[in-house]
Every structure is written in C-alpha cells, then in structure tokens.
Image (cartoon, rainbow, N blue to C red):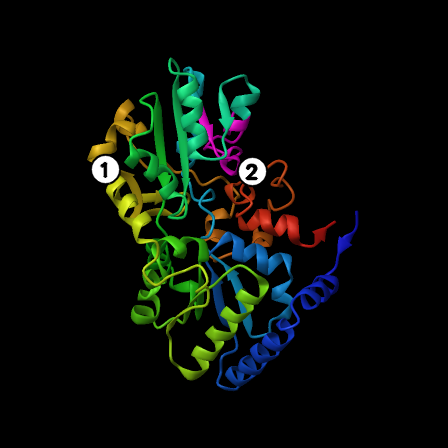
C-alpha cells in the first residue's frame, strides 16, 4: 500500500485524458481575465456526491487557478435524512419488524450519541435489520416471509424515487411491506440555499447528472433566470467536470448566465417523462425537514392517497414531526450547504472516521466528509 500524491494523480489524469490539459489551460486563461475584472474569489458549487468524488479523487482542485474555488454542496441524500427516522426504525426492529435498508444508510446515526445509534448497531444487538440492494429485493424478502411485518427505508433524491414508485404503480408490493419515505427533492434545496444563506455567494453551479436524467436539465433553468447564476448539468468523468467549470467561467466573463447541458448523452431537457409521470402519481410533494438544516418548502415526497396504505407514518399512526438531530460538534449541516469544509470540523478523522462515523456526512460514499477521508490522498 502506498499514498498517491497530488502530482501522481494529475499525471494519471493527463495520461488517461490528454485533452484535459487543453481544458485546464483555457480555465486558467478565463480565470486570469476575470481576475483583471475584479473576480478574485469565484465560487463554483457542485451538487452531487459523485461530482465531489471525481473532483477530489482526481485532484481537480489542485488544477484550479487561485481565484477559482470548488465547493461541495447538498449532493448526499443519506447526509440529510432525519436522524429521528433512524430512531423510529430501530424501535420497530425491537418490536419484531424486519427493517430493510440500502447499505449506504445502514450506519446512518440517529439522534443518540451512544448505544444503539444505527441499524447496524441494532443488528449487532440481534434485531432484524438487513441490507438490500434494491426495493425489488425488499419485495422478494417480504414475499418470502408473508407472516412477518417489514419496513423499507426509502432514502434518496429523485434518482431513486422511480425504483419504489414503479412497483407500487404496478401493484406488486405485498401488504406486509411498509415504506418509510425519506425522499427529498433537489431544486428546492438549491432555492433554499440561495434565498436563506446569502453568505454562500455562489458564482456558478454544476447541477447533478443522475438527478437530471430523471427530472431533466430544464428543472435548473430557474438558476440563471432568477438568480443570474451560470449553471451546467454535467457528467461524471473528469473531462465532464472540467468542461462544466470552463463553461461557467466563460459565461461569467461574457456576463451571460445560461443553462448548459453538458451531459447530453444521458440528460434530456424534459428528463424521463414516463418516470416523472409515475413518480408524481405515487408521491405527493410536501414541505420536508432536512437533517440539521430545517424544513424546506416543497422538498419532500409522501405517498399519495391511493398508495397511503403503504406509508409507514400513515399506517402506524406516527407523526413525521421534525426533531433537533444535529449532533454536538458535527459540522455536517454546514458542509452540506457548502458553508464549511470537512477539515473545518474538529471531529474529522478524529472521533469521526469512515469505519466509525459519528456524523452523517461520514456514512455514505456520497458524503463529502467520507469522500475527503478516503481520497485525500488516495491509498492504493
């Protein structure tokens, strides 16, 4: 095992992507021109955990001019999932429910500081919590055990909403499988950030490719239209991200904020219209709580009336009421909104590590703290 230095990472990047050198050179030229116009701190936010992984893993920040800062934004659905959801699921596992969860939310901490903090901890205690790879796996598990009650922990953004919406729409979900919908919608959190956190002061936004494949690039048109912020929907290769940065700098220089779809090989302006139709027939949009951040208008999804019998809160009579779940000392909410870096947190790589996460941003592979912990530098 050895440590890959920034120099080695850049060398590998250029060897695999010869055109990257040309793009980086153009980025520097535009940045120099903008510096001459007084742009001394250009903040570009990426809005996807995979974009942050690409930027960090390939050392793209080290290629940026001094006046260009790449900021990680709210790109991790696990990081913003309410901690009291975990508390509730742990309680149900103690009451003979089988709790089914994706692997990246299995170690998500609830609101407790010690003891049984996660579904993983509950498993250690002997309670029935399991990892599944898809909602279809959850359906198969429930079918195989018809006399047992099951709950699926549905965590995600618009990318994964169709995976639960379609089986419900098709009527193939068994009655012994309830769903705790922790889905959150992404455009509303960006509006919240720009309206409620002016200190963020963003100059450009790299919009998420996976989400946009479902909701469409046009879903981000409000950013240049209402906020005059250049926005690029980008793919996930290093070249995609570098091109997005170049396009943003060019728009800033020309003072022509627009929406650019760099990821045309996957993303359409209108998105996946069939998936959206099914999603919004199964789910209704509501105001929802984001962990450590607050209630964000029209940012959540609950089951519509026709499918309400599968909704955990409706079926069991629990109230989805926000609870203060910001963990003491943890800066995950600030990191999620781009107001702090992982290294600003006093717990980072001390009390909070990938093997023993204290805060939610260290749990998922899309969490900024986890990405920084595993890629600064890269270990081989």
Q: Is residue 291 above or below residue 202?
A: above
Q: Which mark is residue 304?
A: 1
Give percent across and percent down for residue 122.
Answer: 52, 23
- In the current view of this chain or complex, which residue is farthest to the top? 147
| Local secondary structure at mark 1 | loop
Residue drawn at (74%, 62%) of the image: 8
**Image quarter for residue 5?**
bottom right
Q: Quadrant of residue 223?
A: bottom left
Q: Earlier in the sequence, mark 2 or mark 1?
A: 1
Judge whether 302 appears above or below 335 on screen: above
Q: Is residue 274 left or right of residue 234?
A: left
Count of numbered tags: 2
- Indicate which label's residue lies in the foreground, 2 or 1: 1
Residue 337 in view, yes or no: no
Q: Is residue 314 above or below residue 199?
A: above
Q: Position of residue 161 (x, y in %)?
A: 37, 43
In the picture, the disc for residue 358 is 2
Tell me the magenta residue range: 99-120
């Amino acid at each position: 095992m050895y440590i890959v230095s920034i120099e080695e990472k850049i060398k590998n990047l250029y060897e695999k992507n010869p055109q990257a050198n040309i793009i980086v050179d153009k980025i520097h030229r535009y940045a120099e021109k903008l510096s001459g116009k007084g742009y001394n701190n250009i903040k570009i936010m990426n809005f996807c955990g995979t974009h942050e992984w690409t930027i960090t893993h390939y050392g793209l920040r080290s290629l940026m001019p001094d006046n260009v800062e790449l900021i990680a934004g709210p790109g991790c659905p696990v990081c913003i999932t309410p901690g009291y959801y975990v508390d509730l699921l742990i309680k149900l596992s103690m009451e003979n429910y089988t709790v089914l969860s994706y692997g990246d939310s299995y170690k998500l901490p609830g609101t407790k500081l010690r003891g049984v903090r996660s579904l993983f901890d509950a498993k250690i205690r002997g309670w029935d919590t399991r990892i599944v790879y898809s909602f279809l796996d959850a359906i198969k598990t429930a079918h195989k055990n018809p006399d047992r009650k099951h709950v699926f922990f549905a965590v995600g953004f618009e990318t994964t909403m169709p995976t639960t919406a379609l089986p419900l729409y098709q009527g193939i979900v068994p009655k012994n499988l309830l769903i705790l919908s922790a889905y959150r919608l992404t455009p509303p959190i960006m509006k919240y950030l720009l309206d409620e956190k002016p200190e963020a002061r963003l100059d450009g936004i790299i919009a998420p490719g996976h989400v946009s494949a479902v909701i469409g690039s046009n879903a981000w048109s409000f950013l240049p239209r209402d906020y005059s912020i250049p926005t690029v929907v980008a793919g996930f290769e290093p070249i995609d991200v570098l091109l997005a940065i170049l396009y943003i700098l060019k728009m800033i220089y020309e003072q022509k904020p627009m929406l650019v779809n760099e990821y045309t090989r996957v993303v359409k302006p209108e998105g996946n219209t069939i998936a959206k139709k099914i999603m919004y027939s199964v789910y209704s949009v509501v105001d929802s709580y984001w962990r450590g951040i607050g209630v964000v208008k029209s940012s959540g999804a609950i089951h519509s009336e026709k499918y309400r019998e599968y909704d955990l809160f409706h079926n069991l009579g629990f109230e989805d009421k926000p609870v203060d779940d910001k963990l003491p000392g943890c800066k995950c909410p600030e990191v999620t909104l781009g107001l702090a870096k992982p290294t600003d947190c006093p717990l980072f790589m001390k009390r909070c590590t990938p093997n023993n996460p204290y805060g939610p941003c260290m749990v998922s592979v899309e969490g900024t703290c986890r990405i920084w912990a595993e890629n600064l530098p890269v270990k081989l």
